[in-house]
Image (cartoon, rainbow, N blue to C red):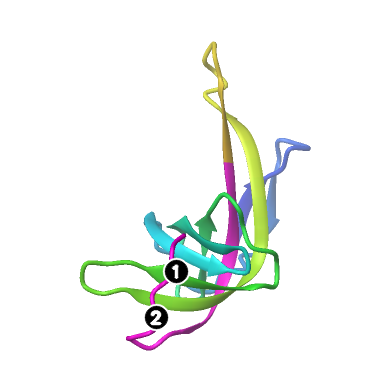
Amino acid sequence: MARERTGLSSEAVDLPERRSAPRLDKVFTVFVEGERGVALGIARNISQGGMFVETRDPSPIGSQVRITFPSHAGEMTAIGEVRYVCHLIGRVGEASASPRHAAIRGMGVRFLYFEADGASPPVVH
């Protein structure tokens, strides 16, 4: 079970772990293509079932996106469904005299399937 602290008290709250697959905590660039066009994103926290993509303009919940993983060895493309969208704003370095603000925008994507080799690459405008 995961332990999470709430903002309401200093006691830990037990929450069930919803993730069923191990996570790879690696950060890399991806192309995201959806109803809002094509954009660069930063893939984070990937598993065999999905991942989080940090992007300026997340696609709407329930929409499908095409995610291309570029590589020197050849790219791989997945079709996924947006399961959640987040816009987090916080402060970094609160203990210092001048804390900075940090923002993360992105979306959680559940993989539906992977495209076969030879699929058309995304067109970046």
Q: Residue at x 44, y 62 (%)?
A: 124
In the rendering, which numbered label is found on residue 92?
none
Residue 104: give x, y in percent of width and height.
57, 44
In the rendering, which numbered label is found on residue 120?
2
**Mark 2: which amino acid?**
Ser
Q: Is residue 50 left or right of residue 57?
A: left
With respect to residue 39, does 81 lie above or below? below
**Mark 1: which amino acid?**
Pro
Q: Which residues are magenta?
A: 104-125
Q: Mark 2: few, some, or many residues within 10 Å (few <14, many ≥20)?
A: few
Q: Sequence order check: which comes first, mark 1 or mark 2?
A: 1
Residue located farthest toward the bottom when viewing the structure as drawn? 116
Q: Residue at x 38, y 57 (%)?
A: 29
Q: Residue at x 60, y 59 (%)?
A: 107
User: Is residue 114 rendered magenta in the image?
Assistant: yes
- Identify the residue under disc 1: 22
